[in-house]
Amino acid sequence: MPLLELDGVTRRYGALVALDQVAMKVEEGEVRAVIGPNGAGKTTLFNVITGTVKPSAGLIRFADQPIAGLPSHQICRLGISRTFQITALFPEMSARENARLAAQARHPRRWQPFGGARIFREAQSLADAALEQLGLTGVAERPAGLLSHGDQRLLEVAMAMAQQPRVLLLDEPTQGLSVEETAQAVDTLARFLQASRMTVLLVEHDMEVVFRLAHRITVLHRGAVIADGAPDQVKADPRVQDAYLGGFA
Amino acid sequence: MRSATRLLIWIVVALALVLAPLGLPPFAMTLLTEAVILGLFAMSLDLMFGYTRLVSFGHAAAYGFGAYACGWMLLHTGMPLLFAVFAAGLLTGFIAIGVGWMCTLATGVSFSMLTLAFAQLLYAISFKWTSVTGGSDGLAGIPRTIGPFGFAALSSKIGFYYLALGCLVGGFLVCSALVRSPFGAVLRGIRENEGKTTALGYNTRLYKIAVVAVSYGLGGLAGALYAPFAGFANTELLFWLLSGQVLIMVIVGGAGTLIGPVLGAAFFMLMEHQLSALTEAWALYFGLIFIAFVLFAPEGIWGLATTRLRRAAPRP
């Protein structure tokens, strides 16, 4: 049984069809990349899964439970955590506090308006473990706003991991990084993914990154799935080459 | 700052406030009591402004509502002072749940405008609903009813000062527990990046409504103290000018510190008192002071004081 399943998911903005009958199945433990040219609907797909955008039609099932239309904070609490294409952190808090606040969101008494030493301690231990997984222990006390871009991207992943999600959605984790920073971040991510066996849905522009990290690739073009398969299969698919190269290849 | 130094400063301040009635002349006690009440009012706004970055342009609504509610109860129900004050504060906080619910439909400047709209609505009502509010005359001759439980001491000038001081200290303890709690950590998240806080799975709107309710409740408590302190409640307590002044107190004192806004309120009163003796255009000069703070000391009086002390103390 797939952990995350989409069927006929459609999102329209007026006449524009951002997502067109998208169907896909993500198995537990799989690292799935979603690729496609600009405007293919990759980020909309993430927004629809996490509930920040409601689908116009279609079914989304997570762990055999329909989630389409639920508010995003509820979807998040079911075990879907995401990162953003544009870095979103709490810049004045330290990396540890960032990750702690992420972990606290899963605590049953996260809203307690007094005391809370124990809640903080429990959240902090999850947070520290996640920081360690992504190699951020050395910079954990620094304000998040002062970390290098590469570390900021990894901190976002650590925050998502501190929530102990069942599925991790990574929206262009190397966006805005230099070539060297990308290489470093991808090394760390590859090591982390191998060690954690996390189920991951990954949107990425950089094909090298995709082929290095993903087990399986789904190709979106103008909102529709045009190919789905193992990396080598997808690379060789003439429709994919068409979509990317506009038929000039 | 070393904890021993800090403890010493706290003890000195606490002793000074407790023993103040022994050494100060009556008119100074009146000023000090008003400063304590305004300090509580400014501190209540700090929860929203300093800790959650919810800018209220209509905090006078809380103060004025609390004052009118307390004044009305004292005039018409014969409720004892202590009960009327706390009932008015609670009532303000309770009604603020609705206000918070409405205002948090918007964010940013629109949120601020909605808070202002609510305050102006109350201001208009206070003029028109003459049978309850007394219209443009307001409520006058508000008594400090002693009641059957023998809190007679609280209704004297000095007793009332201790009542106000107790409310300030109690309010401070509640606020500082709140901002250090898990709830407070979420507020800080909302302040720094609300979108991310939502994405982490927090229902940020509920947190904002809760903080509006607590903030207005404490602001209402301050207003409820003001009515029996001054003996009257009038429309000025609901006017936008007061909402602006309390924001200035928070910023000049140091937003996001709780203590700072209390100092800011005292500083504001002191300046108003000193400058208005010299010139009618005192607000103009205070405006210059305010601008100087924003430009050169955005961390406020408390921020300046703590960095000084930290520098003076030997590092361990």
Image (tube, rainbow, N blue to C red):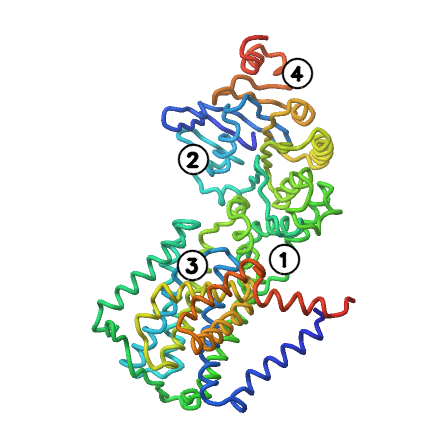
Q: Secondary structure at mark 1?
A: helix
Dot 4 surroundings within 10 Å: few (below 14), some, or many (20 or more)? few
Q: CA distance from mark 4 to mark 1?
A: 46 Å
- Looking at the rendered structure, the kind of residue marked 4 is Asp
Residue to which mark 1 is pinned: A120
Q: Secondary structure at mark 2?
A: loop
- Looking at the rendered structure, the kind of residue marked 2 is Lys
The answer for which chain carries disc 3 is: B
Apparent side of residue B246 relative to residue A146 in the rendered image (left or right)? left
Quarter of the C terminus of chain B within the rendering: bottom right
Q: Position of residue A167 (x, y in %)?
A: 59, 36
Residue ID at (30%, 65%): B123
Q: Nearer the viewer, residue A204 or B56?
A: B56
Residue to which mark 3 is pinned: B56
Q: Position of residue A43 (x, y in %)?
A: 52, 31
Residue ID at (49%, 28%): A6
Residue to which mark 4 is pinned: A232
Dot 2 surroundings within 10 Å: few (below 14), some, or many (20 or more)? some
Disc 4 + disc 3, Cβ < 8 Å: no
- The residue furthest front is B279
